[in-house]
């Protein structure tokens, strides 16, 4: 972790320079969750249990009022810093670069546009539907053994689109060509592994954003 120290210090320096408020409870949640759920002596679980343990809170929060401009932070900073003052607001770095509240997305039905061309969500597809990366519309979910083309979003549940067909993810020890084929999203040397993720931390933000580790 010595090589990551300058990056952690950069986050701390930004917080000091911009008079951000430190949330020790959030910091404790993130570190405890990362070590407990993804520690070197434990099986890695990558996504869901970690997000349920406080991974979405912000260690530092700023003072930018609703509707006013917020800074475009780099990945490591954005993982731990939210410049907006209100706890229910975020900096819209994909569009307006202003502080805005989290919106409740409308429920979309089959054929309705659920995503724009920049991959911004416009709505949530109703049960049994998925938002297609090809058409940007809500389409029926595809079951196991059925064709999905090149669209990974349409497979139902935990199924993945592999070779144009929706199939179950491969277990630890199975042969693989891509991390996305594995239950653990860890394909190393052609084999699916249940890798202790904390050992693979390459950036400070990896403690928060598990998807940063998928290709390592």
Image: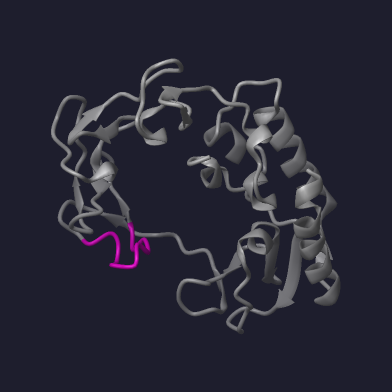
Q: List x then y, in percent, for residue 76.
A: 66, 59
Q: Quadrant of residue 81?
A: bottom right
Q: Is residue 52 visible?
A: no
Q: Is residue 189 left or right of residue 129?
A: right
Q: Find residue 114 and report its horizontal and vertical position in percent.
A: 28, 59
Count numbered badges in the picture.
Answer: 0
Magenta run includes residue 111: no
Task: Name which residue lies at 43% across and 22% down.
Answer: 191
Q: Which residue is most to the top?
A: 173
The structure residue drawn at horizontal position 78% and vertical position 70%, both measured from the top left corner, is 14
With respect to residue 71, does 59 lie above or below?
Answer: above
| Residue 207, picture quadrant | top right
Residue 117 colored in magenta in the image: yes
* Quadrant of the image containing the N terminus: top right
| Magenta highlight: main SS | loop
| Quadrant of the image occupied by residue 155 | top left
Instruction: Give 65 or 2, whichever is nearer the viewer.
Output: 2
Q: How is the image coloured?
A: one colour
| Residue 66 x %, y % | 62, 78
Q: Nearer the viewer, residue 74 or 65?
A: 74
Residue at x-position 37% and y-position 64%: 120
Residue 125 % position (x, y): 29, 50
Instruction: Relative to 166, say whether 206 is above or below.
Output: below
Q: Is residue 26 above or below residue 10?
A: above
128 displayed left or right of 18: left
Magenta segment boundaries in residue numbering: 113-123
Residue 4, placed above or below residue 52:
below
């Amino acid at each position: 972790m010595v090589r990551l120290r300058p990056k952690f210090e950069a986050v701390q320096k930004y917080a000091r320079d911009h008079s951000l408020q430190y949330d020790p409870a959030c910091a404790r949640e993130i570190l405890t969750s990362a070590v407990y759920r993804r520690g070197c002596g434990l099986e890695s679980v990558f996504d869901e249990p970690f997000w349920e343990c406080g991974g979405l809170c912000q260690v530092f929060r700023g003072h930018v009022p609703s509707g006013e401009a917020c800074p475009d932070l780099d990945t490591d900073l954005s993982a731990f810093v939210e410049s907006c003052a209100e706890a229910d607001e975020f900096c819209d770095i994909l569009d307006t670069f202003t502080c805005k509240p989290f919106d409740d997305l409308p429920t979309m039905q089959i054929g309705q546009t659920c995503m724009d061309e920049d991959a911004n969500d416009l709505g949530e597809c109703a049960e049994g539907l998925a938002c297609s990366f090809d058409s940007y519309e809500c389409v029926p979910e595809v079951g196991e053994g059925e064709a999905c083309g090149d669209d990974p979003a349409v497979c139902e549940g935990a199924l993945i689109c592999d070779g144009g067909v929706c199939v179950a993810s491969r277990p630890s020890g199975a042969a693989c060509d891509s991390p996305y084929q594995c239950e653990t999203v860890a394909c190393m040397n052609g084999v699916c592994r249940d890798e202790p993720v904390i050992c693979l931390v390459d950036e400070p933000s990896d403690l928060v954003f598990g998807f940063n580790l998928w290709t390592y």
